Amino acid sequence: MSLDDTDKTILNRIQSDFPIEPRPFGVIARELNLQESDVIQRVLRLKQAGIIRRIGANFVPGKVGFVSTLCAARVPEEKIETFSRVVNRYPGVTHNYQRDNEFNVWFTFIARSREEIAQNLERIAKETGVEAILNMPATKVFKIRAQFDL
């Protein structure tokens, strides 16, 4: 799917500052001199095409009583799909990537406590047979936000 200039302008606008309004797409449409229905249709098309993964809030886990960790697992090639499906079932998993590394599956996990994360990692290991899972809790946030200028 190719993106035209209007698609790119909409994507730039909604990445990090989505309007908290009863009609957010109307706000965006007015700002960009478009029709609300056109903005909605374009966003829907971009979502259906997989360009937009989700529209939702991001929060700082520690400020709302949660902790986060980065996990890395050494997963045999033949178990990667199954392992990833199991990991993705957990609601606290926010990202899950395959990497070209000895530890070849990396994911982030957010939960109410480090103990909850440790218990979930034990469950994942037991269910998948993958024992080599590193748990590297976040201690300080450096990345504030990602904004990609299209």
Image (spheres, helix red, strand yellow):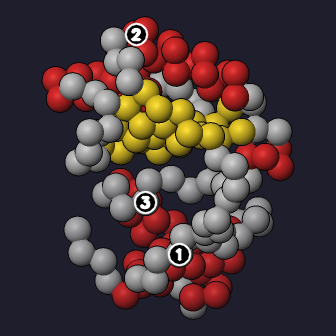
The nearer-to-camera label among 1 and 3 is: 1
Could you say which quadrant of the image residue 97 lies in?
top left
The nearer-to-camera label among 2 and 3 is: 2
Q: Position of residue 11 (x, y in %)?
A: 48, 74
Tell me the SS state at disc 3. Answer: loop
Between discs 1 and 2, the one toward the N terminus: 2
Check disc 3 and report the residue beneath it.
52
Answer yes or no: is residue 142 visible: yes
> Horizontally, is 132 left or right of 24 in the view?
left
Q: Residue furthest top?
A: 126
Q: Amino acid at mark 1?
A: Gln
> Horizontally, is 113 left or right of 101 in the view?
right
Answer yes or no: is residue 10 visible: no
The residue that appears at 54% across and 70% down in the rendered structure is 146
Q: Nearer the viewer, residue 116 or 85?
A: 116
Q: Amino acid at mark 3?
A: Ile
Dot 1, how many residues are within 10 Å of its Cα: few (below 14), some (14-19), or many (20+)? few
Tell me the SS state at disc 2. Answer: helix
The CA span between labels 1 and 3 is: 14 Å
Q: Nearer the viewer, residue 91 or 113?
A: 113
Q: Nearer the viewer, residue 39 or 56?
A: 56
Q: Position of residue 69 (x, y in %)?
A: 59, 40
Could you say which quadrant of the image residue 80 lies in?
top left
In this view, 126 is above or below 48: above
In this view, 38 is above or below 139: below
Q: Amino acid at mark 2?
A: Glu
Q: Which mark is residue 147?
A: 1
Q: Which mark is residue 98?
A: none
Check disc 2 and report the residue beneath it.
127
